[in-house]
Amino acid sequence: MKEKKKKTFMERFRSFYKGEFLLNIHADEYFVHIIWVFFLAMFMIWAGYKIDNSLTVMERNRAVLEDLEIQYTQRKSELVKLDRISTIQKNLSDLGSDLQLPERPATVIKKKGK
Amino acid sequence: MAKQRKRVKEKALLGKDRVGFILDATYAFVLLLSALIFVKIIYIQLTYKVDPRVENLFRPTVTKQIDMPKRGAILASDGKILAISTPVYQIYMDCAIQRDVFRQDPEKGGLKEQEWRDEAKELSKGLAAIFQDRTAEQYYQFILAKREADKHYEKIGKPVDHATLQQIKALPLFRKGPNKGGLIYKTLDSRQYPYGAIARRTIGYVKDNSNSNGNNLIGIEGRFNYELHGKEGHAWLRKGEKNNRIHNFDSTAVKAVDGNDVRTTLNIDLQDIADRALRKNIQDEERISGACAILMEVETGAIRALVNLQRDTTVEGHPLSERMNLAISQIGEPGSVFKTVTLTSVIEDGYVHSVDETVPTFRGNLPGYSRVRTDPHIVDWEDSTHRKEIPIKRGLEISSNYVFAYLATKYYESHPKNFYDKIYRYKLGEKFDFDIDGLGTPQVVTPDNPYWEKTSLATAGYGYSIAVTPMHLITFYNAIANDGKMMRPYLVEDVEKDGKILRKYGPGILGNICSKATADTVTRALKGVPQYGTAKKLRRAKLQVAGKTGTAQVALQAEDKPRKGDQYHDERGRKKNQGTFVGFFPADNPKYSILVTVYSRLSLGSFYGGDAPAATVREIVDAIYSMDTTCGETLRRDGALPVMEVREAETAEGKVPDVKGFGLIDAIYAIENSGYRCAYEGSGHVVSQSPSGGAALKNGETITLKLK
């Protein structure tokens, strides 16, 4: 009986590197599944990356929205300041206008029968 | 034998030594280990610094972020914004940014540093223009000095709004971003009050109140803080692919709930009118220390304007500002405006049936009450009319203390409790529920009160021996205007979110204080006060006002050092006055009730309700008249008005388009599109044209329009 030759470390490593251990455990029978798992792993990594990208865009948009909301509120606040009767009268006066509040209230036209 | 014994002994000793040695060694080892651990602990605590790379590995990758809710807005009755939250930004600068990087580059470092400084010079110009607190050169020198001092966080100017922040971000150097330009900004929560100081004390404060005495949460901001504040939330952030922070949706997150909006009853136009009128009438009178005005809707009790002005003597020029809510908190003896209360009571109790009934005058001396002062108005009345009696209505018009002391004592002397029960029924003796904190509790000297004197009932008849707030007074007058139905004064209409009402507050009834007949009789008397009495300034108001003036002396506090035995005057004979006008308008169909009270500081003069208060009321009434369409004329449309038709100018080659009835812009458009020129005179609509529509005309010719 021929004595089995003992493998050196380098030979073992080379064999492992070539994936011979997979043949030893008959993994070739599950080759398609291994490919599928590999594909799923790749897909997970890719999906995770895309999700992160989407979330980054979402965060950026959220910041823009917040910014716009603040801008809107401040503009609204500035416009409200101008809306005050005293401010309007002062602005008119500064512009040299003689326009004043009316002396008499507006006349209302009512429909017949009302 | 001895040798054998020695060997046994050595063996025994050796065995003992071995165990002992192991134990000793173990002990020594543990001792050494403990010492090492101890030394290591000391070392870690005092000198050891973790390698940042290792430290980073131990840091949690997910961080918690607290989300602050957006505080709700306070709105006027028509939805105008009275208070809203929006952030402001404090600018900082990393003045030493990239300085070390430039230094490490011996070849181009100097050049890059110079470029940075050139840009900093341009930046300084921008900062000087925006903040206007330093010149461009000063800013430049400031930045350079801080750069030399290796300062990384230097404050620039005061907090700015969002629009200004955008301008700052666009400045040279800053536009390069925080890592190269050195711009750092901190977001600060800020509450904006677009109308500034107007109604400020009523709207309230949430912080930054310089007159707070430690309590910042006052007014509507304070009372409705639980609605306005909202609820904090939190989120978990993790590092994204691009090294940024993104939401980690694997973790639990609680969304912040924004605060609700509070809609008030205030009408900002009316508030502005009242504020301006009151300022105008007290601004130049230095002896007036403060004043308040209340405008209330008769039917509902909704407060449309609430002005509180006080002179700030700590500031130069003593400007008027909203510091205390005098209208709800200032308790004082009301004086003559209380005569209406006495009148209502005697009519409602059936003692007096008409205000034309008379009372005997006795030269103004109240029989049996020698301590009650002689009324000079009655002496004048007797002298001018030679009559020994005076109609009650006239007594109210000339504001006679005697008449009302007489009525109170004649009808209630034997059972004063009935009079005071009436006062409580009118809610003038108790505090009622109000929408903001600080409503004062009236003080009434009743017969069972230790301060009760024989004259108390008589003086109560004309508004002394009793102290109420302006809000209590107007609530009573509002009930008279509302046919005896007393409405609860209120400031908050509802609580809402995104325009949807969550909780309705609205009007409430405090009770019926008198019959409609009594209210009508009292109103008739009150109409005479502006017409023939002490409120002459209101005689020509554009809407008829019914009301009463009142001038009361204010009981001095200890700090005012009152004269001994006289709580109304100090040693120098000076006094404090409270002048009030309270009433309602239009007198025949009341829509608003109004009160104006002014408070004087210690002075020798008097401040009458018929002066500044009545003048202020007059201005408010006239302004409301001109703004209120229901006060205007109504034209009834009898005939059918022609319906306007939309038509286009008929255009045909070589023919003039008919533009009669068109506005100028449409007419020019139609004419020039047809290839003609246009000349016009007048304004309005086209009433005639030459040549007329449809006439033949060469291209390029002019068509003249007449507008009217």
Image (cartoon, rainbow, N blue to C red):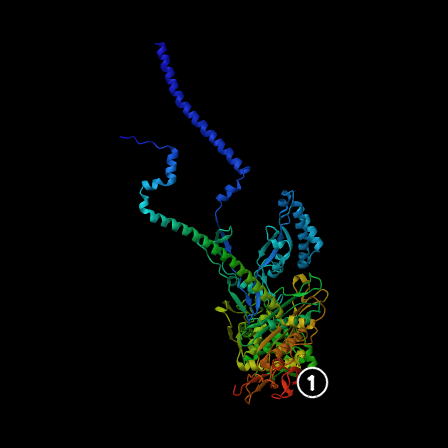
Q: In the rendered structure, the residue with mark 1 lies on which chain?
A: B
Find the residue positioned furthest to the left.
A1
A100, B566: nearer the viewer: A100
Is B516 rendered above or below residue B460?
below
| Quarter of the figure with the N terminus of chain B | top left
Kind of element beneath mark 1: helix
Write the residue at 63% across / 42% down: B104
Find the residue positioned furthest to the top.
B1
Instruction: Say if residue A61 shows up in the picture.
Output: yes
Q: Quadrant of residue B571?
A: bottom right
| Quarter of the figure with the C terminus of chain B | bottom right
Q: In which quarter of the image is residue B375?
A: bottom right
| Residue B164 coordinates in the image, percent (x, y) | 62, 60
Write the residue at 54% across / 60% down: A64
Is B681 rendered above or below residue B88?
below
Instruction: Say if residue B464 shows up in the picture.
Output: no
B444, B266: nearer the viewer: B266
Write the residue at 45% across / 52% down: A49
Residue that carries the numbered disc 1 in the rendered image: B385
| Residue B22 coordinates in the image, percent (x, y) | 41, 25
Q: Residues within 10 Å of mark 1 (few under 14, many from 20)?
A: few
| Residue B502 coordinates in the image, percent (x, y) | 47, 67
**How many discs appear?**
1
Which amino acid type is shown beneath numbered disc 1?
Answer: Thr
B253, B4: nearer the viewer: B253
B233, B380: nearer the viewer: B233
| Residue B3 coordinates in the image, percent (x, y) | 36, 10
